[in-house]
Image (spheres, rainbow, N blue to C red):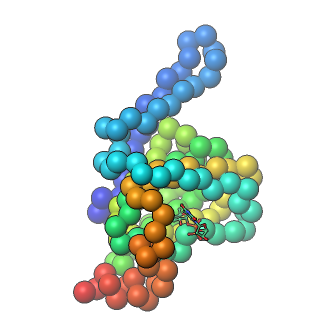
Amino acid sequence: MENVRLIEIPKIVDEQGRGKLSFIEKDIIPFIIERVYYLYDVPSDAYRGGHAHKELHQFLIALSGSFEVVLDDGKSRQRIMLNKPNIGLLIPTGIWREIDNFSSGSVCLVLASMVYDEDDYIRDYEAFKLLKST
Ligand code: T46
């Protein structure tokens, strides 16, 4: 799917056994971060998302646990599991996304290219399909 991709985040494994450290600097993701939010305490049978964005680019990371992301570009669908804190999913503009199968205690961190703007959402799937077909 065009411009959707998994990006590896650097991981430093401490030589004294103090665990791991990952960091995100400006050259890792192709947009300037304007907002950070996170999803947590999500029940395993809940689903989030169910919309596309007109302008927003996002980068999703499973900071803890796992969840699945369904991506739809209007032509095809794919399902990606995120379960590593050093792998993020880049979702560019114009992609429908649904997020489900949250494991217990999972945390989804999202880096976003814009501040929150409800006008940027396309929450109707038929309207999304129509937009993609024109
Ligand atoms: C996305 C997925 C991964 C705010 O006030 N500020 C914010 O930054 C966000 C993201 C949401 N909100 C409010 C808007 C709603 O009243 O929080 C409420 C829940 O938002 P929403 O139903 O859009 O949440 P999700 O988890 O379905 O979707 C969110 C993002 O909105 C969306 O961009 O891609 O997480």
Q: What residue do we see at 62% from left, 22% from top?
A: 19
The residue located at (74%, 62%) in the rendering is 43
- Above or below, 49 against 30 in this view is below
Asked whether, in this view, residue 132 is left or right of residue 50, the answer is left
Is residue 30 visible to us here? yes
**Could you tell me residue 114's position as x and y percent?**
40, 58
Picture quarter with the N terminus: bottom left
What is the x, y in percent for residue 77?
43, 72
Q: Quadrant of residue 126?
A: bottom left
Q: In this view, does 79 lie above or below 88?
A: below
Q: Where is residue 107 in the image (x, y as percent from the top left)?
A: 64, 49
Residue furthest to the left: 134
Instruction: Give above or below for 96 relative to 131.
Output: above
| Residue for point 64% across, 69% down | 47
**Residue 81 quadrant:** bottom right
**Quadrant occupied by the C terminus:** bottom left
Residue 77 visible in the shown view: no
Q: Is residue 110 left or right of residue 113?
A: right
User: Nearest the camera: 29 or 32?
Assistant: 32
Q: How many marks?
A: 0
The quarter of the image that holds ligand 1 is bottom right
Q: Point out residue 51 in the picture as x, y percentages from the top left corner.
A: 49, 75
